[in-house]
Image (spheres, rainbow, N blue to C red):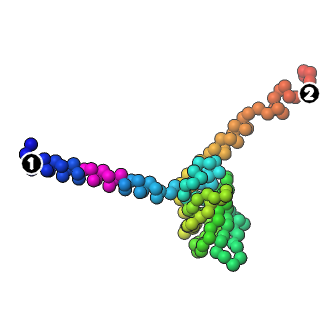
């Protein structure tokens, strides 16, 4: 192999290696900045690592917003109408923030509640994030399935052995 080809081979190898290292660093950086959206049902079920930063999406529970006098600190409860999870936020809440409306709070769990560093409120009456709508639909399906199984399982009152009528007719 002549020296020119050898030099080109080394240069091509270095370009491929640099591209692989750069791509790996890019993927690593993006993974560390990803925040996943979870519903209150998923958080209560323990599907969120305790040290992870994530987004909590749902509806602000009616009569749950409380503000500290003389500060910007606000506490409220986010619900998917099946489970509830408390949130604390120290900052100015968005103008569209209201009880009974959709909200996404970003932060980490501390002392059994989400300490949010960002709160986003919906801007339209019909808008709900797809992930939140899917989580609510899944929770409804699970709830309906559990009620159906309870309705079909025999109870002591409905089994023939449990009746105290005695004798035959």
Q: How many marks?
A: 2
Tell me: 103 left or right of 23: right
Query: Which residue is found at the position 46% from the left and 58% from the top?
Result: 33
Q: Quadrant of residue 31?
A: bottom left
Spatial CA span between label 2 and label 1: 104 Å
Q: Quadrant of residue 128?
A: bottom right
Magenta highlight range? 16-24
Quadrant including the C terminus: top right
How far across and how far down the image is residue 90, in percent?
Answer: 62, 70
Instruction: Give residue 135's mark.
Output: none
Disc 2 target residue = 165
Comparing 27 with 165, the one in front is: 27
Find the residue positioned furthest to the top.
168
Judging from the image, what secondary structure is the residue with disc 1 in?
Answer: helix
Q: Is residue 142 above or below residue 111?
A: above
How far across and how far down the image is residue 151, in percent?
Answer: 73, 38
Instruction: Give residue 3's mark.
Output: 1
Quadrant including the N terminus: top left
Query: Which residue is found at the position 54% from the left and 58% from the top?
Result: 53
Eye-nearest disc, 2 or 1? 1
Instruction: Mark 2 or mark 1: name the one nearer the start of the chain.
Output: 1
Query: Which residue is found at the position 50% from the left and 57% from the top?
Result: 35
Name the dominant secondary structure of the magenta segment.
helix
How far across and how far down the image is residue 72, in percent?
Answer: 64, 75
Comparing 1 with 88, the one in front is: 1
Tell me: 17 left or right of 60: left
Query: Which residue is found at the position 30% from the left and 50% from the top?
Result: 20
| Residue 37 is at least partly visible in this image | no
Tell me: 61 left or right of 165: left
Residue 36 among those drawn in magenta: no
Find the residue positioned furthest to the front.
3
Comparing 165 with 9, the one in front is: 9
């Amino acid at each position: 192999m002549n020296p020119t080809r050898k030099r080109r081979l080394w240069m091509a190898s270095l370009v491929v290696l640099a591209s692989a290292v750069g791509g790996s660093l890019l993927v690593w950086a993006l993974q560390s900045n990803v925040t996943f959206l979870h519903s209150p049902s998923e958080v209560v079920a323990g599907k969120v690592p305790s040290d992870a930063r994530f987004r909590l999406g749902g509806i602000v529970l009616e009569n749950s917003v409380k503000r500290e006098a003389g500060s910007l600190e606000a506490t409220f409860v986010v619900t998917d109408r099946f489970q509830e999870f408390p949130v604390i936020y120290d900052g100015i809440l968005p103008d569209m923030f209201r009880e009974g409306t959709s909200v996404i709070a970003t932060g980490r769990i501390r002392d059994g509640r989400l300490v949010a560093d960002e709160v986003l409120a919906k801007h339209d009456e019909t808008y709900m994030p797809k992930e939140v709508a899917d989580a609510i639909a899944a929770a409804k399906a699970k709830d309906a399935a559990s009620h159906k199984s309870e309705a079909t399982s025999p109870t002591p009152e409905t089994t023939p052995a449990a009746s105290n009528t005695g004798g035959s007719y």
